[in-house]
Image (cartoon, rainbow, N blue to C red):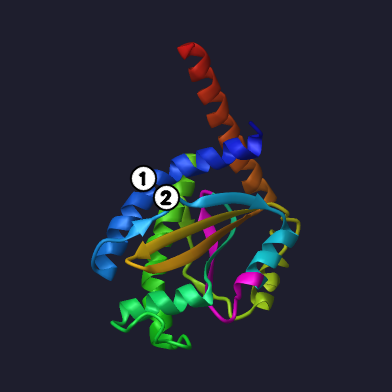
Amino acid sequence: MKKSELYKDIFKEASNIAMSHALTSLSQMIGGPIEMEAPDVEIVSRAEFLKLLAERGVSKGFTVMFDVTEGLSGLTILQFPKHSALNISAVLMGMEPGSMEELDEMGKSAIMEVGNILISAYTDILSNLIGEPVSLSPPKPAESLYDIEKELGRPDLRNVNSIVVFKSKFYKEDIGVESYFYLVPTPESFTKLVKKLEKQISEEVEANDEGN
């Protein structure tokens, strides 16, 4: 198995507990049972990352940025594509899914409540992976792809070329909501994260060898 696949497996293992907590909180907020898929994880290049953001629509959906202030360093981004943003805001505001055509300030505020739950889950995942607390700054709005590109021009992010992408999807009855969480770590933080993953892989290999 390739290391990239092993990394994905470890990310998914770390996400199980955090996402189960998120599922409980989302069910309470939205009202009624919901189902959530395990996050899909991939590591992409800077160019692929910008392409994904553009395809999913920064300005038409709901996108916010956070600086990583503890544990790691860099930038994180939470994105709901337009269709998902409209669906979840309609449900939270007691409206029929599909009845909203544009996202107003009240809708954005409603989505941010869901976003806070998911952000908490993702920071828990990262904390589990590195064995340290991970904290984020207050959110910064991203109104366009340019806002994100401007952040990537910061001295600490200028040479970043490895971005971790988490995709999660949850359902309430026949309504599906997709969200994307991007971790844009500084090169030093990416190295730190990879070393932690490598250590976990080595420990798992040793445990398997001892079991055999």
Left or right of 85 in this view: 42: right
Q: Quadrant of the N terminus?
A: top right
Most foreground residue, 211 or 158: 211
Left or right of 59 in this view: 149: right
Most foreground residue, 167 or 190: 167
Does the magenta run of residues contain 58?
A: yes
Vertical side of 192 occupied by 108: above or below: below
Q: Residue at x 53, y 39 (%)?
A: 9
Q: How many marks?
A: 2
| Residue 132 in sight | no
Q: Which residue in the protein does label 1 denote?
A: 17
Give the amino acid type for the residue marked by disc 2 in the picture: Asp
Residue 146, given in percent of the width and then of the height, sits at: 69, 77
What is the span of residues highlighted in magenta in the rendered image? 55-71
What is the C-alpha distance between the residues marked 1 and 2? 9 Å
Mark on residue 116? Answer: none
Does the magenta run of residues contain 14?
A: no
Residue 8, given in percent of the width and then of the height, sits at: 56, 42
Q: 10 Å neighbourhood of mark 2: few (<14), some, or many (≥20)?
A: many
Q: Which residue in the protein does label 2 denote?
A: 124
Asked if disc 1 and disc 2 are in contact, CB closer than 8 Å, the reply is: yes
| Residue 105 in sight | yes
Residue 178, given in percent of the width and then of the height, sits at: 48, 65
Quarter of image, res 33: bottom left
Residue 172, given in percent of the width and then of the height, sits at: 33, 66
Mark 2 or mark 1, which is nearer the start of the sequence? 1
Give the amino acid type for the residue marked by disc 1 in the picture: Ile
- Please tell me whether mark 2 sits on a helix, a strand or a loop: helix
Q: 10 Å neighbourhood of mark 1: few (<14), some, or many (≥20)?
A: some
Quarter of image, res 22: bottom left
